[in-house]
Each structure stands twice: as structure tokens, then as C-alpha cells.
Image (spheres, rainbow, N blue to C red):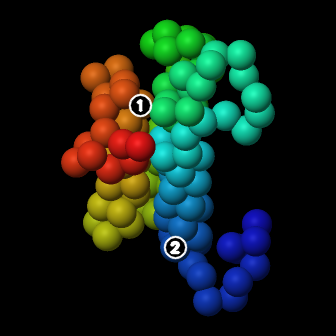
Amino acid sequence: MVLLSIPFFSIPVVWTLTNVIHNLATYVFLHTVKGTPFETPDQGKARLLTHWEQMDYGLQFTSSRKFLSISPIVLYLLASFYTKYDAAHFLINTASLLSVLLPKLPQFHGVRVFGINKY
């Protein structure tokens, strides 16, 4: 609603920005921030893990993980529909979706690509 109130933004631009902002925030909060915001009894084991890796004790395909994986896909489908599958918007939305879905795969659990966010 906030982006729609800006007079120079068209509906396709607003949907693409909504998708990109959501995926960027999701990536930062789930896949880059490490540790816990409170004291845990795990003797510091969680300080090297992201929130996604800590969720459900590392079990894959739980209901919370499925929900957090499906929500960017639904937003991507909505953004693609409302941008009328324009090539530029479609490319931006697809890159944004892949950047947030790939870290959620079980093959990337605990993996630090190029050593980024290793410590």
C-alpha cells in the first residue's frame, strides 16, 4: 500500500519492488544473521548458525520451513501475474526468488559460499 501511494510507480514496478524487498529482508533475517537474540542453554553452539539452520533443530521439511519456502513462491507468482510476465520484471523477480530459495535447500545447510559469513 505504501509503494502504491507513490505517484510515479506503476503497478508492475510496485509488485516487483514488493517481491524484491520481501526476498531481501527474508534473506537477511533468515540466512545471514547468526546467533540468537537471547541467552540459550546450548553452550554457544547456535552462535555460528543462521536462524534458518537453527529452526526446528535442523530438521528439514517441517511445516514452518515449508511455509517459509512457499511464501516467496506465492509472492513471485503474484508479482509475475501483475507485471503481465514482462521480460525485465520477470528476470528480476526470478533472480530474487532464486536468491532466497537456494539457501533453503538441504544441500546448503551449513554451507558458506565463498567463505562469506563463515565466522
Of the residues shown, which amino acid type is indicated by label 1? Lys
User: Residue at left 50%, top 31%?
Assistant: 49
Quick check: 5 left or right of 55?
A: right
Quick check: 102 left or right of 3?
A: left
In the image, 43 versus 92, the foreground residue is 43
Secondary element type, mark 2: helix
In the image, 13 versus 33, the foreground residue is 33
Residue 13's mark? 2
Q: Is residue 58 above or below residue 7?
A: above
Which quadrant is the C terminus positioned in? top left
Q: Is residue 117 above or below residue 47?
A: below
Mark earlier in primary sequence (2, 1)? 2
Judge whether residue 105 can be spotted in this image.
Answer: no
Identity of the residue furthest to the bottom in this view: 8
Locate residue 25, reporting x and y percent.
58, 54
Identity of the residue furthest to the front in this view: 43
Locate residue 82, reporting x and y percent.
52, 59
In the image, 80 versus 108, the foreground residue is 108
User: Residue at left 55%, top 45%?
Assistant: 33
Residue 104's mark? 1
Q: Quadrant of residue 56?
A: top right
Secondary element type, mark 1: helix
Judge whether residue 23 can be spotted in this image.
Answer: yes
Q: Which of labels 2 and 1 is toward the front?
A: 1
Locate residue 16, reporting x and y percent.
50, 64
